[in-house]
Image (cartoon, rainbow, N blue to C red):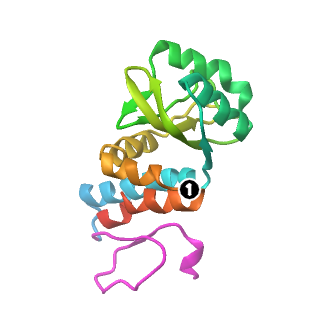
Amino acid sequence: MQVENHQLIISYSDENPPTLKVPLISVSRELRSEDISKIQMEVDSFGTSALINELDFYKMNESSNVDAIKFLINKAGYVNLLPYFMKREVMSPTDIGNMVALPHPFLKGSESRAKIIVGINQHEIPWGHQLVRLVIIYIPTADLKTNKSFFNDVYQRTSQLTTVQQLLKTVNKEQFIKVWNEKGDHKNVI
């Protein structure tokens, strides 16, 4: 068996586990609730990791939240969702603090798959009751299944202003993903 072809390995062996490039969870032969929690955390992180690894990344110079959303969804090819984003913003602005906004459409998703679009603005934009520079757009799948783990991940990773400042300094997708992953690697939990 080639372990590199797998995303997660669950072992109940008492031996020292080999060093692998994929996550390994060692559990008791009698699966306990703490083992199930470890497995659930790791499985939940797969969706978040996949979304982050496939994100679209843009630098921008917009002056309003509406302009920022229009710019990002147009660049990424989701302009048809603009009315659903605007409806959500009218209901309640999607700023989440520390210069970060997490816009998402109201009751509409992508016809193909969930998508993340990241935009870093050159200057602060008024957004709700705050100022924002980092915009992380989340587009769910058409069935509207929300990746709650992703929302939790965004809140956790952007709760520290120093992390947000490091993300704002990134100049491309690869740097952004690297900084993002450094600031909350789920693999350390196991």
* Camera-side residue of 54 and 147: 54
Q: Is residue 117 above or below residue 130?
A: below
Q: Is residue 27 magenta?
A: yes
What residue lies at 25% left-to-right and 55% top-to-bottom?
A: 33
Q: Position of residue 64 (x, y in %)?
A: 55, 24
Q: Position of residue 55 (x, y in %)?
A: 60, 50
* Camera-side residue of 21 and 162: 162
Side of 164 where 109 appears, left or right: right
Q: Is residue 16 above or below residue 141?
A: below
Side of 169 where 71 appears, left or right: right
> Can residue 135 be seen at all in this image of the molecule?
no
Side of 94 where 156 appears, left or right: left
- Find disc 1 in the rendering and name its residue: 171
Q: Position of residue 173 (x, y in %)?
A: 59, 56
* Camera-side residue of 22 and 40: 22
What residue lies at 61% left-to-right and 49% top-to-bottom?
A: 57
Q: Position of residue 2 (x, y in %)?
A: 58, 81
Say what secondary structure mark 1 lies in.
Answer: loop
Q: Is residue 12 above or below residue 129?
A: below
What residue lies at 32% left-to-right and 56% top-to-bottom?
A: 36
> Can residue 117 be seen at all in this image of the molecule?
yes
Q: Quadrant of the C terminus?
A: bottom left
Q: Main secondary structure of the magenta part?
A: loop
How crowded is the residue under tag 1: few (<14 C-alpha within 10 Å), some, or many (20+)? few
Magenta-drawn segment: 1-28
- Amino acid type, label 1: Val
What residue lies at 27% left-to-right and 70% top-to-bottom?
A: 28
